[in-house]
Image (spheres, helix red, strand yellow):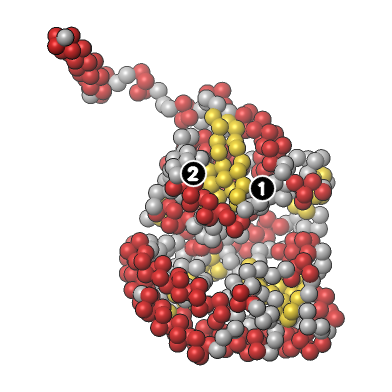
Amino acid sequence: MFKKKASVLSLALVFLLTFVLSACGGKGEETTAQQEPPKEEAAVQSDGTIDPSKLEPVKLKMYTIGPYQDDVPLVEEEINKYLTEKINATIEINMIDWGDYSQRMQVITSSGEDYDIAFTSSWAFDYLPNAAKGAFMPLNDLLDQYGQGIKEVLDPRFLEGTKVNGVNYGVPANKELAQQHVWRFNKKYLDKHNLDISNVTTLEDLEPLLKTIKENEPADITPLAVPKSFKPFLPYDFLIGDEIPIGMHLDTEDFKYVNLLETPEMKAALETMRKYYQAGYLREDVATLDGIDNMKTGKWLVDREITQPYAELGWSRSAGYDIVTRPMHEPVIFTSSAAGSMMAISSYSKNPERAMMFLNLLNTDEKLRNMIQYGLEGTHYKKLDGPYIEDLPAMQEKYAMPGFALGNMYLTYLHEGEPEDKWEAFEEFNSSAKVAPTFGFNFDTSPVKTEVASITNVAKEFMPALYTGSVDPEEYTQKAMQKFKDAGIDKVIAEAQKQFDEWKAQNK
């Protein structure tokens, strides 16, 4: 028995030794298998196109944000016919509703599910912390090998601004890179009361308009229609979202992060909001109001929104009445705006090369890009002359997709009434924008994660009430400042400053 075991062991050792020797052979003794490039790489032609005949069929799994649409399977079938022709792949599209997306994706990622692609951003399934903890695959090499089309069409500042320690973990959507807040007005009430908005920029500039509506319209018409998430515009680049009051002034000379509750801009904004709240210009329950249906009801004068070129046309079409805007500030490129809409490849993906091929098509292939957003011609939309389409009822009822989350917007069709130079206007909007002093800096919160969690809780407790004017700012600011200090805000600011100074020294 012992001899039999020894014989088997000897045989195993022979096989092992043979394997090791072949693996460690000299440079001139490489095997044929080593000389052949991987199948995915071999499928890339000299002009960068893909030869699908050299690829094995794979099925990709993608998660994106938005409520489930009944016609996804119908459109998916046609998409897969096209993808099979292009990269010998099919895709399964999974949608998760807006409010559930971040939490569900965290659970899916933690479970180790081998999905391939997911929507991520600075506001949903948060890009930076998930990239830092290894949820997403590094993409630099994949972009070089299978995403050259992305690099050719995408403003390079998108990729530069979303790097984490020099590494890209997501492909940003090609859309507006800059961010600009606007006052958005219901034109009906401007016309009715002959209100002039040509010089309205600041929060204080709104006062005579709000007063007119309050005194001359029924009580159910809200002068300043905002929910609890409203924040007055402050000329700062916020460190961790605009709920936590830490930021650097856009016109900084010393490049220092500060506690915004200690700034004159914050003090003035909170005092103005308190005055407006007491005057009845906002809803009494604004501090607890998760959302507001002003666009649906039309019973409002002004709210605040982030714009893009010709946004008024889209808002007006969606609302069914005319909406006009006035900018609060010049367009600014923030790190967070570069990461406003991205697609990442999961670190658990078994087909990252094919996933990048798919993302490359989403950013370069007009047919695929419009199919995934608008569905099927004749079923979901009617094709008009030029780049225009008309929505059919089935689009709104069964296939209303979040277009901004699905890749290169510049490839998409236009709706009737939109100017033909829309995408040229986007490029001009981006190129003319001011760059924030912290653009490209991504704060690693791990050294102060306990403090960040604590100050986040303090922000949720105090900031909605302060920002909406629902409480006395003098009294509550002092309480909030003490709570923030007890929670470690000074330590967070010090750590952010340390990291920023090091980053700035390396990225002159």
* Sequence-first tag of 2 and 1: 1
Q: Residues within 10 Å of mark 1 (few under 14, many from 20)?
A: some
Which image quarter is the N terminus in? top left
> What residue do we see at 46% from left, 47% from top?
109
Where's residue 28, x and y in %? 26, 20
> What residue do we see at 51% from left, 28% from top?
43
Where's residue 437, x and y in %? 45, 70
Where residue 18 sits, quadrant-wise, is top left
Cα separation between marks 2 and 1: 21 Å
For the residue marked with disc 2, what is the amino acid? Ile
> What residue do we see at 45% from left, 44% from top?
111
- Discs 2/1, front: 1
- Which residue, given by chain and number where applicable, does mark 2 sit on? 345
In terms of depth relative to the viewer, which is nearer, 425 or 416?
A: 416
Location of residue 16 with respect to 46 vertically, above or below: above
- Which residue, given by chain and number where applicable, does mark 1 sit on? 68
For the residue marked with disc 1, what is the amino acid? Tyr
